[in-house]
Amino acid sequence: MGGDFTKLVSELSNDPLFIKLAPLSETARKHYDDMELVTRFFAYADGYPDFEGYKDRVASYLDEYTNRMNIELAESPDKRNELVARFKEMLEYVEKCLGDRGFKKTPTGKTTPHARFEAIAVGVAVALSEDKDLSRKDMSWVDCEEFQTLVRSDSANVKAKLKARIDFVANKLKAER
């Protein structure tokens, strides 16, 4: 699935800060999990809060989003800069609050669970979209039982669970303004 958005996703999946904060095994990278995480970030951030067209089937939702964005970027190349800025702003905020741990399940973890990445990345993006000057927050709640339950993989792709985990992060970040 070629196109301008697909090229952008490939570039962003090789961003050094993304690689540092969202480590993946070589096998996962060979299966394009890195590109899938970047695509999920944009698809879910843009689809939030209703995720129109999402039917608990991630692959078809991401494919439809990618097709739409390939067309949109071909027609409006300036949008590319806005997408890059949003992604990098999210990564920088995550690094500022979580340090090298980033999206890993544990401080010494070696991989990035999809549901955890979505929750943190999109939750941060939602909070930043409402407050560009969002101050650094203590995000130690990423280890609390409530968050752990929300990002477990059981039925993780159900729309209500997707929204609940993103809401959890966004609301935690917005609560302490």
Image (spheres, grey):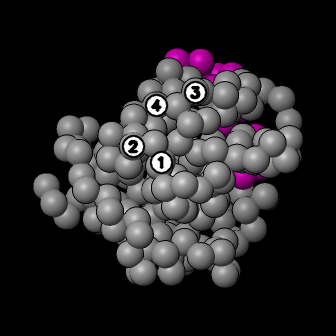
Task: Assess whether residue 71 is covered by the magenta stretch.
Answer: yes
Q: Quadrant of residue 52?
A: bottom right
Disc number lying in front (3 or 2): 2
Looking at numbered disc 2 in the image, what kind of residue is underneath it?
A: Gly
Q: Secondary structure at mark 1?
A: loop
Looking at numbered disc 4 in the image, what kind of residue is underneath it?
A: Lys
**Dominant secondary structure (helix, strand or loop) of the stretch shown in magenta:** helix
Residue linked to disc 1? 102
Gap between marks 4 and 3 measured at Cα: 11 Å
Residue at position x 63%, y 44% in the image? 23
Q: Quadrant of residue 13?
A: top right
Using the rendered image of the protein, determine whether residue 51 is visible from the camera's viewpoint: no
Q: Are marks 1 and 3 in contact (CB under 8 Å)?
A: no
Residue linked to disc 2? 99
Q: Are marks 3 and 2 in contact (CB under 8 Å)?
A: no
Q: Are marks 2 and 1 in contact (CB under 8 Å)?
A: yes
Task: Assess whether residue 13 is covered by the magenta stretch.
Answer: no
Gap between marks 4 and 1 measured at Cα: 13 Å
Work out whether 39 lies above or below 79: below
Looking at numbered disc 3 in the image, what kind of residue is underneath it?
A: Pro
Residue at position x 41%, y 69% in the image? 143
Spot occupied by residue 160 in the image (x, y as percentages of width and height) = 54, 78
| Sequence order check, earlier mark of 3 and 2 | 3
| Sequence order check, earlier mark of 4 and 1 | 4
Q: Are marks 4 and 2 in contact (CB under 8 Å)?
A: no
Between residue 150 and residue 103, name the one nearer to us.
Answer: 103
Looking at numbered disc 1 in the image, what kind of residue is underneath it?
A: Gly
Q: Which image quarter is the C terminus in? A: bottom left
Numbered circle sitting on residue 88: 4
Residue linked to disc 3? 16
